[in-house]
Image (tube, grey):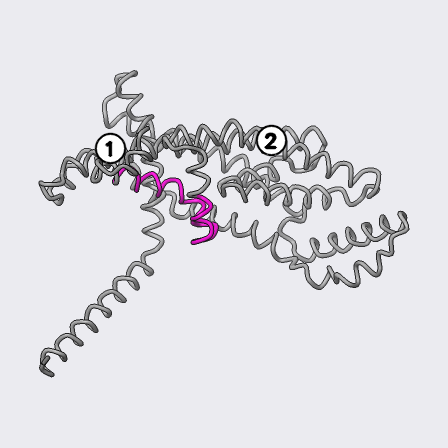
Amino acid sequence: MISSRILANGILRAIATIVIICLILFFLYQIQSVLIYLLVSLILTLIGTPILVFLKRRLKFKHTFATITTLVIYILIISGFIMMFIPLVISQGQNLSLLNTVKIEENSLKLINQIGAFLESHHIDSSKILSSSNLSSKINFNILPNFLNSILGTISNFGMGLGSVLFITFFFLKDREMFLNGAKLLIPDTHEEKILNSLEKINHLLSRYFIGLLLQLFIVFILYTVVLFIFGIPNILVIAFLCAVLNIIPYIGPLIASILAALLTMLSNLGNDFQSEIIPTTIYVLIGFWIVQVIDNNVSQPVIFSKSVSSHPLEIFLVILIAGFLFGILGMIIAVPLYTIIKVICKEFFPENKFIQLITKNI
């Protein structure tokens, strides 16, 4: 029989453990900005490692100079991004009414009225349809500006921590070997080789993945820009950039991008005739976006999600689908990198397992 003293000690230990866990979680919550900086720096390090290796091996740069050059490349890219898009959003945002909720509501109601007039011209009782659906009361006009403001806010917050991110990235790149040697001291000798092999493979695969992802977004941005330019849509760079960013979300992102492009196209052409100009232009833009997505789904994505992480397309699709059901949009975004890490670790520690051999045969 358990004595009361042993039981009391067990309860106290359990309470102490819970308190310590809560304090750790609270501490991590308080330094969440630092954790985000570290995560961004880690991603930049993974992307920058191939550039660093190229500068050292092909151009014979010294390690420190190669690190500085890689960082300068990042700064030039980020500066170009800021110079291109931020002034564009500020100067043209009001014209497009992207950030003005009242204007969006006013324009959207005009659009609903034009849709009603279009239905009436085709002998359809629009008043009954629109009153039964009660669109004006159900539409949340804050969705679009809140989404865009969140993107701008993220860019702004990232700008505030840009110096910290670049500083951390510099030392991640420069002292990568030192960090690995330090990690060796913490790793048990029995698993040292397996863990180090895992880290090397993970670094290689994720570097390819993130570089491929950036290339995919750039290609999609260029194609979206061409489509919007062909049909004379105002503010093409802003719309194309926002829609390209949504492609980070696998499968669902392009669908949301198409809806966003259609809405912004209609809102940008309110002064034109609804039946002869707005509807055809919107349909043409949607067709153009769907063609871009067909190209992306059959060319860009297979290269990135399959070849870059050495996984079968169906395997990747199922992983993203399961992650989406379990953890929502965030799960879909991190599904491929996390799955790649798990596969590499399983291959190193359970190489004899038949199932592990099957899913990791290309790694």
In the foreground, 191 or 282: 191
Q: Which mark is residue 200?
A: 1
Q: Does 269 lie within the magenta span?
A: no
Q: CA distance from mark 1 to mark 2?
A: 35 Å
In the foreground, 136 or 267: 136
Provide residue 18's location: percent of width, then percent of height. 24, 69
Mark 2 crowdedness (10 Å alpha carbons): few <14, some 14-19, many ≥20 = some
Is 342 situated left or right of 324 in this image?
left
Q: Does 331 lie within the magenta span?
A: yes
Provide residue 146's location: percent of width, then percent of height. 57, 55
User: Would residue 299 be seen by someone viewing this image from the given angle?
Assistant: yes
For disc 2, the marked residue is 292
Q: What segment carries the magenta color?
A: 320-345
- Looking at the rendered structure, the kind of residue marked 1 is Glu
Is 200 situated left or right of 143 in this image?
left
Q: Quadrant of the N terminus?
A: bottom left
Residue 63 quadrant: top left
Is 195 situated left or right of 114 in this image?
left
Q: Residue at x 83, y 53 (%)?
A: 116
In the foreground, 124 or 314: 314
Q: Residue at x 70, y 54 (%)?
A: 103
Q: Residue at x 68, y 34 (%)?
A: 287
Provide residue 245's location: percent of width, then percent of height. 52, 40
Q: Quadrant of the C terminus?
A: top left
Residue 221 quadrant: top right
- Looking at the rendered structure, the kind of residue marked 2 is Val
Look at the picture and state if 335 lies above or below 67.
below
